[in-house]
Amino acid sequence: MVSLAEVVAGLPETRKLYLEDSYKKEAESYVLRWIKETGRKGYLVVKETIMHPKSGAQPSDRGVLESDGTTFTVSKVMEYDSVIVHYGEISGGDFKEGMDVRMHLDWERRYKIMRTHTAGHIVDYAVVTVYGRPFQSQSATHDVGHGFQEYLGKYLGDLKERIEDVANEVAVSNRPVFAEYVSAHELGKKVFGAPNLGRLPRLDVYRIIVIEGINAIPCGGTHVKNTSEVGRIKIESVEQVSNGFRVSYRVLDS
Ligand SMILES: [Zn+2]
């Protein structure tokens, strides 16, 4: 069993192309490390990547990396010490360090995750609006087409129809969604309506996702660039959990 610490030892931080442009579906890079584990499976690190790891409530991207007849199918993407590690299965040949690769993102899956993640930030706003007070979030998941947010605090009742109405008003309001980078010092002035301030790591620079006029939330995820791309948001349930409540939602395709 190979540890991620061994996989990334001595490697530089990966350039995260998905943070620069979440719509980038293909890119070129080169192999920094290839460690075979068992059979045709192993760990691949390249200089830059378009694939988001499993982190910050988002699931792993999927896709392929290829080079001269060699195809590597990614089943899991992980981050360790700021290095992105692709885990998957190789076929047709083998990789060597320094080899050029072309990567292709499973875009259909990713785009759905982007819509779901932006919907999650809209749900944060709708919850504050409907209950009339801010909440701290304790966890969240933005999966392929469905997600949930869990908030700390008293359960104030199942207002899912009202939350859904507010969320959909925002979704159809054609608001720009964009990332900004702010220093730790500026963070307090730039964020608003953010439920996750109580559980942020300590960083020098924070990436925040702004939905114009709605909220600005520290976030390392991939988002659509306009709320109109989210589509219809369905609030599936609002339920009490041990120390708060959970709002589960789905983005609909039509
Ligand atoms: Zn987020």
Image (tube, grey):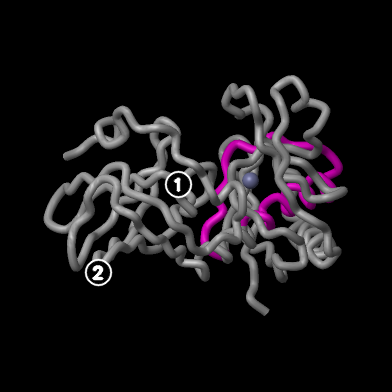
Position of the N terminus, as image quadrant, is: top left
Position of the C terminus, as image quadrant, is: bottom right
Three-letter amino acid code at disc 2?
A: Gly
Q: Where is residue 42 in the image (x, y as percent from the top left)?
A: 22, 50
Q: Position of residue 124 (x, y in %)?
A: 73, 47
Q: Residue furthest left?
A: 39
Foreground: 208 or 97? 97
Q: Where is residue 143 in the image (x, y as percent from the top left)?
A: 52, 57
Residue 154 can be seen, yes or no: no
Give me the residue at 61% from left, 29% from top. 200
Question: What element does badge 2 sit on?
Answer: loop
Foreground: 200 or 22? 22
Callout 2: few (<14), some (14-19), or many (20+) C-alpha neighbours within 10 Å?
Answer: few
Is the CB of mark 2 within 8 Å of ligand 1? no
Give me the residue at 41% from left, 42% from top. 84
Q: Check residue 69 in the rendering and tell me which mark sits there, or answer none.
A: 2
| Mark toward the start of the polypeptide (2 vs 1) | 1
Foreground: 191 or 181? 181
**Residue at which label 1 appears:** 48
Q: Are marks 2 and 1 in contact (CB under 8 Å)?
A: no
Q: In this view, does 1 lie to the left or right of 147?
A: left
Which region of the structure is painted magenta?
Answer: 117-145
Callout 1: few (<14), some (14-19), or many (20+) C-alpha neighbours within 10 Å?
Answer: many
